[in-house]
Amino acid sequence: MTLLTPLTTAITNNINTPEKPATSAQLLTVEQATMNYGQRILWKNVSFAIQTGEFVALLGANGTGKTTLFKTLLGICHLQQGRVQIASNINMGYVPQLKDFDPKLPIRGRDLVRLGLDGGNYFFGWINDKRKKTGKIWLSAKQKNYMVDRAIAEVGGQAFAEAPLHLLSGGEQQRMRIAQALVAEPELILMDEPLLSLDVASQKIVCDILAHRKQTHHTAIFMISHEIQPILPLVDKVVYLNQQKATIGKPSDILPNSDLFCHHILDARL
């Protein structure tokens, strides 16, 4: 199945990033992980892995601990049992849930994207944080501007990147967030409900961007989503949290047995 659409092709024509080879590697491993919330067990004995180029959907009802699992991968929460292992020397991008920006915040779209390079550095990016595993201790202003421009072009955001963030639509803001996650060329991206509150047209644009990233860069994507239909053509694997357990498998194996999907839509896709 071809993932690129006319919109994705138009975006791709604006950038000159060479296609990366599809070398498979295990980027993320979760082994026998258990997480409690007070006295309540969110999930237990969760085990799965994510490979290069895989699109993995994290599904489950509200309160099953999907965002908590992401926080664990980001090092914000700590497991009661088990372990998380992320491959060394890889970049990992993160797209949080969509929230409105304060109108008083003096930041443009491209400034948000630039934080994907400078957010963990000192003195506004003049000195890079050496704890990062990027292998890059110093980037010149010219190099950073090039990387920012490339990421903005990849999401088709040139027309609004210079505008204040609070004036952008929800879909435009989300494209800037995705560009921020892409700017450091990550091998793995975590996305927390990136389609939430977007209209159908904006959802389509986001899915086209992710399709391009998956097909031409072989970037692994781990996405929390309640909107499974728009991303279903991209999904390789599902992690379904339900009743304190995780079921892992292909969409055709997991979704017909869950409460999250209409069988006739899945049958049409397969």
Image (cartoon, rainbow, N blue to C red):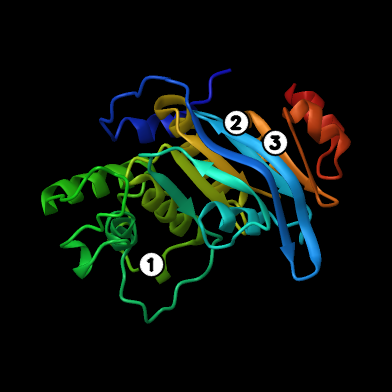
* Residue at the (42%, 20%) spot, across then down: 23
Horizontal side, residue 106 vs residue 143: left or right = right
* Residue with the mark numbered 3: 238
For marks 2 and 1, the one nearer the N-term is 1
* Residue at the (76%, 61%) spot, across then down: 63
Q: Position of residue 181 (x, y in %)?
A: 40, 49
Residue 17 falls in which quadrant of the image?
top left
The type of residue carrying mark 1 is Leu
* Residue with the mark numbered 2: 234
In the depicted structure, whether residue 22 falls above or below residue 139:
above
Image depth: mark 3 or mark 1 in front: 3
The type of residue carrying mark 2 is Leu
* Residue at the (38%, 49%) spot, across then down: 179
Residue 168 falls in which quadrant of the image?
bottom left
User: What is the secondary structure assignment of the residue under circle 1?
Assistant: helix
The type of residue carrying mark 3 is Val
* Residue at the (73%, 25%) spot, across then down: 269
Distance CA(mark 3)–CA(mark 1): 33 Å
Horizontal side, residue 233 vs residue 10: left or right = right
Residue sitting nearer the eye, 78 or 98: 78
Q: Residues within 10 Å of mark 1 (few under 14, many from 20)?
A: many
Are dots 2 and 1 in contact, CB under 8 Å?
no
Q: Position of residue 176 (x, y in %)?
A: 40, 55
Look at the image and tell me whether residue 48 can be seen. Answer: yes
Image depth: mark 2 or mark 1 in front: 2
* Residue with the mark numbered 1: 165
